[in-house]
Amino acid sequence: MARPPRNRSHFFLDGGGQGEAYTSPRTVISGLPPARARAQHAAKLSQSLATAIAGAQQFIANREAGIAEGEHGFYLQFDIPAAERGAVEALENKPAGIELVAVPQVAAGEESITATVFVPERSVEFYSKKVDAYRNEETKAGRPKNQNLIARIEDVRLAAVRSLFTDTPDLYPQPDLAVWWEVWIRDGKLASFRTVAERLNIPLKDHAIRFPERDVVLAHGTEAIIARLLINSDAVAELRLAKDTPSTFLEMGAAEQVEWAEDLVDRLVAPNALAPAICLLDSGATREHPLIAPALPAAHQHAYDNNWGVGDSQFWNGHGTSMAGVALYGDLQQALTQQGAVELPYWLETIKILPPNGGNDPLLYGAITETGMTKAEASAPLRKRVFCMAVTSEIGLARGRPSSWSAAVDQLTYGGGALRRLIVIAAGNLRGDIHAAEYPDRNDLEEAESPAQAWNALIVGAYTDKVNIIDPAFGDWAPVAPAGDLSPASRTSGTWDRQWPVRPDVVFEGGNFAHDRVNPSSHVDDLQLLTTYYRPNIRLFDTFGDTSAAAALGANLCANIISARPTLWPETVRGLAIHSAEWTPAMRDHFDGAGDASHENGNAAALRLGRAGPLSCPEKCRR
C-alpha cells in the first residue's frame, strides 16, 4: 500500500516519540592505551613537537605575499599503532580549529598508521599542552591526564605532500614528474584554492565534484608545485592520483563489460527525428554494438562501393567503430561512470570509403569523398550534418600547396555557395616509431597530411592532458608529452610556406605516448581514450587516440553546437569552434620561451611556433 504524502504542515502529532539517553559528541576512545614509560614517552613527543613547530614556523614564514589565501596554519602527521586506529578521530579538535584531513591507506601487516591534521597558527601549542598535561597532571582516577590520546601516539612530525597522499604508496608520482592530482578541498575553501592555483599558474580542470564537507578538483603539477600550493593555502585536505583511465574497463571480463554497457543503454535518451548527424567517412561501423545502435539506424549506413558492405573490417582494426564511439560519447568512460540520463543530441551516419582490404587509388580520393557525401545527403536531404574524416595521405605533400584531394574538399565545403558543408578533417599522424627525444621537433617538421591543405574545412590536431600512468607494469615509464601540449603523433604546418593556412585550426584530446627511456615510445592504455570495439561479441570497449580521436571530438563539438543552434551556417559553426579555443599554459610556454619578439631571432622563433599551429583547445575539451 502506498504511503500518503506528508503535506499537512499545519498538523502536529504529539506523542509517539521515543526518548534516548544523551550521547556526548566528543570522541571517546575505548579500551586500554598501550603501556608507556610516562616520562620518557612525554619527553620523546615533546621533542618531536618542538622540531615540528620550528618547521611549521618556517612553513608559515614561506607564505608568499600576493599569492597566499586563507588562515595561516600547517599540517602535522601522527604515527599511531595500527591496533589503536580509534585514536585517529581524537586528534581532531573543532573548537581549536584543528581538522583531521588525511588517513593514508595502510598495507596489510603494517604495525602503524599515519594521520594528518591541519593546525591553524592560533593553535600551534595545542598538542604540546596536551603532552605537558599528560606528563605532569593526573585525573581524579589517578591516571595521567590525556592518557587515552597521548599514550596512543607513537610520534609526530611536520607533514609534507606525501603525508596527504591517501592512495596506495606505489601510486605516488616520481618527484620530478608532473601529473594530475585529485585534490580534496576542505569545506568552504574551494574559491580560495582556485585563487591561489591561478596565481601560481597551476592548471585546474573546470569541473569540481561536491561531497559533504569536501570538494574535489584536478590540479596539474609536480610534487614541488603541490608543496608550494600547500604553503600558500589552507584549503587542501587530501591528495590522490587522478585515475580516469580506460584500463579499468579494459581489464574487465566480457560479462562485466556487458553490465556496464547495459546500464548506459538504459540511461540513453535517443535523438529526436529532426536532430542533426555526424557523418563519418571511414571504414564503416559495427551498428550491432549496443552503444552504437541507438544512434545509428541501418538506413544511416552507406558505402562508396555497395559491394564493400557497410560494416567495419578487421583490415582497418575497427577504426570506423572507434571513431563512432568517440564522436557519439566523447571519452566513453565519462558516459559510463556518470549517473543519470545521457542525452544523444544527434544521430550517426557512416560512409564506408575504405575498402575491406587494401587501399584506394590516390587519383580517386576526391571522387570517393564526394560520392560518399552525396550518398548520405540523398538519403536524408533535409538533415543537418557534420562530416568527419580521419583518413589522410602523405601523397601530394608540398609545403602546404593544395593537392587535388584538398581542392576537392574545398569545393565540397563551399558547394558553389548553394550547398555549404561543414567538414572536420584530421591533421594526420606521424608514421613509424616515435622517439621521446625527437618530441616536439619532429612534430614541427612533419607537415599535416592531405587533404589538410583545404582552406575551408576545420582541420583538427591532437593535444593531450593525459599524463597519469596507473598500470604498475608501466610504473617506471614516463609520458612523452607534458600535460596541455601537442600529442606526440600530431602533425603541424611548421614547414609550410607562409602563403598557406596554419594547421591545425584547433586541437582536441588525442591521448599520449609513454616511453621507458630506452626504446621507442608506445601507446599505453592509461594515456588513451575509451571507445567502442568493432567486435562486440568478443569485448565491448577499446582504446583510441591520435588525431583520429581528436577529429571525432571536434565533430562532437560541432554537432552539439548545431543541435543547440540549428539555424547557424556551417561556416559560423566552424568559426565558433575555432574562436572558443584558448591556449593551455604548456602552449603559452612555447611562445614565452621563444625569446624577445622584438629581437630578430626571437621573432623568427615565434613565427616558427606559430606556423606549427594555433595549438588552442576549445572550451569543451578542457572540462
Image (cartoon, rainbow, N blue to C red):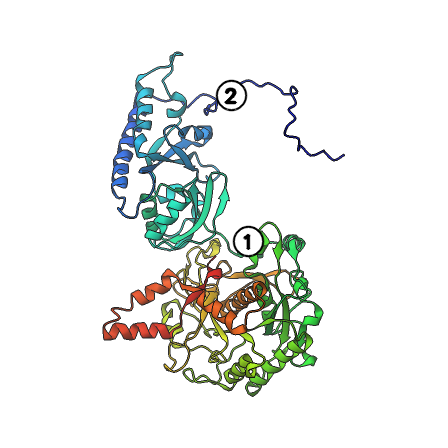
**Is residue 48 placed above or below 164 in the rendered structure?**
above
Q: Quick one: 482 or 380, which is closer to the camera?
A: 380
**Is residue 620 placed above or below 15 in the rendered structure?**
below
Indicate which disc residue 23 carries.
Answer: 2
Amino acid beneath label 1: Thr
Position of residue 427 measured from the top left corner of the image (x, y, whole percent) = 47, 74
Which residue is at a point 35% across and 52% down the rendered structure image? 198
Position of residue 135 measured from the top left corner of the image (x, y, whole percent) = 31, 20
**Is residue 149 placed above or below 256 in the rendered structure?**
above
Which residue is at a point 37% across and 62% down the rendered structure image? 586
Amino acid beneath label 2: Thr
Separation (CA) of disc 1 from disc 2: 44 Å
Identify residue for label 1: 248
Q: Quadrant of the N terminus?
A: top right
Callout 1: helix, strand or loop? helix
Is there any visible trace of residue 192 in the rendered image? yes
**Is residue 607 placed above or below 20 in the rendered structure?**
below
Q: Residues within 10 Å of mark 2 (few under 14, many from 20)?
A: few
Is there any visible trace of residue 313 in the rendered image? no
Which of marks 2 and 1 precedes in the sequence? 2
For marks 1 and 2, give the one nearer the viewer: 2
